[in-house]
């Protein structure tokens, strides 16, 4: 028995010794896996709603009162809904691995540990909110809150990726005085666009189930309300891209160009879906792009600070090269 415990202890020490003590390829891969998976689950959640499978599993946490898994009698809707629930376990595995990969560097990189914990706690929170949506027969406000939390987790995962690549955040980069207010205002308008878009979706035809309630608002009117902050955020993104080109900051320049590109595509998809009667494919793309927009906007804000390590190396409050990746 003692020999068995010694072997188990030896294996445990071997696993602990294998865990990273600095950011390496494994940490970078798991950071990207976290961001991609948090975005993909929005797509699968959208598929649940857009295929009318929101109550494919009519109860929670079980799929039926007698079974945790979908049954053949539930058909395609049960498969779609249960598949989305299964993806939650993938996110849990990724979150556990992310935590394990940064726990040994908790003193040198405490921000990575905090971010991994926040992302990990967000997954069961989302599962509970998802369960409430089922138990409330897809109440549109609860469904909307479910999407908001997903967008927040995408933003956190973006911060995790950036911190993995750039290290701890240093001081603000020296920029023209209007840059930061414009960037913050653009970020606020981006989030307003997302929130109003959620309200619009809650008033539209894609309830997730034929019997699910809508929020009762005028969908066509709210589509117009939704377009106003969208155009304003595009104007802010364009202005930031022009400024970034002038100040010569590579990360900010790339991030703002990406922001303009995502805004353009998102506006195009939004206009197309409104004019084509909200086809499910375009609505699904619009939902995923909303999370991509949040991620890129987060990257723009993060580009306003230089990495702490680069600043320390240069022994200067701000260095232009320090903001490049």
Image: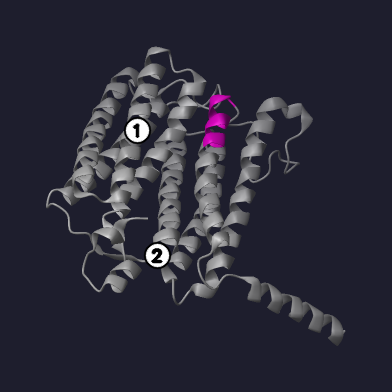
Position in image of residue 309 (x %, y %): 35, 70
The residue positioned 50% from the left and 26% from the top of the image is 207
User: In the rendering, which numbered label is found on residue 167?
Assistant: 2
Decide which of 105, 146 is in the foreground and name it: 105
Per the image, the residue denoted by label 1 is 261
Of the 4 image quadrants, the one containing the N terminus is: bottom right
Residue 195 appears anywhere in the view: no
Q: Are marks 2 and 1 in contact (CB under 8 Å)?
A: no
Q: Is residue 268 above or below residue 94?
A: above
Query: Image quadrant of residue 297?
Result: top left
Position in image of residue 124 (x %, y %): 55, 53
Q: Is mark 1 on a helix, strand or loop?
A: helix
Of the 4 image quadrants, the one containing the C terminus is: bottom left
Residue farthest to the left?
Answer: 177
Q: Tell me if 51 is positioned left or right of 288 in this view.
A: right
Q: Tell me if 222 is positioned left or right of 74 in this view.
A: left
The residue positioned 60% from the left and 28% from the top of the image is 53
Magenta segment, principal secondary structure? helix
Badge 1 density bin: few <14, some 14–19, many ≥20, Cα 10 Å = some
Magenta-tinted stretch: 43-52
The residue positioned 40% from the left and 36% from the top of the image is 290
Position in image of residue 67 (x %, y %): 75, 42
Position in image of residue 149 (x %, y %): 44, 46
The residue positioned 45% from the left and 52% from the top of the image is 157
Q: Tell me if 159 is positioned left or right of 225 in this view.
A: right
Decide which of 139, 317 is in the foreground and name it: 317
Query: Image quadrant of residue 194?
Result: top left
User: In the rendering, which numbered label is found on residue 71?
Assistant: none
Marks 2 and 1, the one that precedes in the sequence: 2
């Amino acid at each position: 028995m003692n020999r068995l415990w010694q072997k188990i202890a030896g294996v445990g020490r071997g696993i602990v010794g294998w865990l990273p003590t600095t950011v390496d390829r494994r940490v970078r891969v798991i950071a990207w896996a976290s961001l991609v998976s948090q975005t993909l689950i929005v797509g699968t959640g959208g598929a649940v709603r857009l295929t009318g499978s929101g109550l494919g599993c009519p109860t929670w946490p079980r799929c039926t009162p007698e079974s945790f898994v979908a049954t053949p009698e539930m058909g395609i809707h049960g498969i779609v809904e249960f598949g989305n629930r299964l993806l939650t376990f993938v996110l849990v595995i990724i979150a556990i691995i992310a935590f394990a990969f940064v726990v040994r560097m908790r003193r040198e990189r405490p921000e990575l540990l905090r971010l991994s914990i926040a992302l990990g706690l967000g997954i069961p929170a989302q599962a509970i909110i998802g369960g409430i949506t089922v138990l409330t027969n897809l109440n549109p406000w609860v469904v909307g809150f479910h999407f908001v939390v997903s967008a927040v987790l995408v933003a956190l995962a973006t911060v995790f990726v950036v911190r993995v690549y750039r290290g701890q955040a240093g001081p603000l980069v020296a920029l023209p005085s209007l840059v930061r207010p414009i960037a913050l205002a653009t970020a606020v308008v981006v989030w307003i666009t997302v929130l109003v878009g959620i309200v619009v979706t809650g008033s539209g035809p894609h309830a997730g189930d034929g019997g699910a309630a809508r929020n009762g608002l005028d969908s066509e009117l709210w589509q117009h309300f939704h377009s106003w902050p969208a155009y304003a955020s595009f104007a802010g993104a364009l202005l930031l891209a022009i400024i970034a080109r002038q100040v010569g900051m590579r990360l900010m320049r790339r991030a703002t160009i990406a922001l303009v590109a995502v805004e353009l595509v998102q506006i195009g998809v939004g206009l197309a879906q409104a004019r084509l009667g909200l086809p499910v494919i375009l609505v699904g793309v619009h939902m995923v792009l909303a999370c991509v927009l949040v991620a890129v906007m987060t990257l723009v804000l993060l580009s306003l600070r230089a990495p702490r390590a680069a600043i320390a190396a240069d022994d200067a409050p701000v260095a232009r090269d320090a903001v490049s990746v």
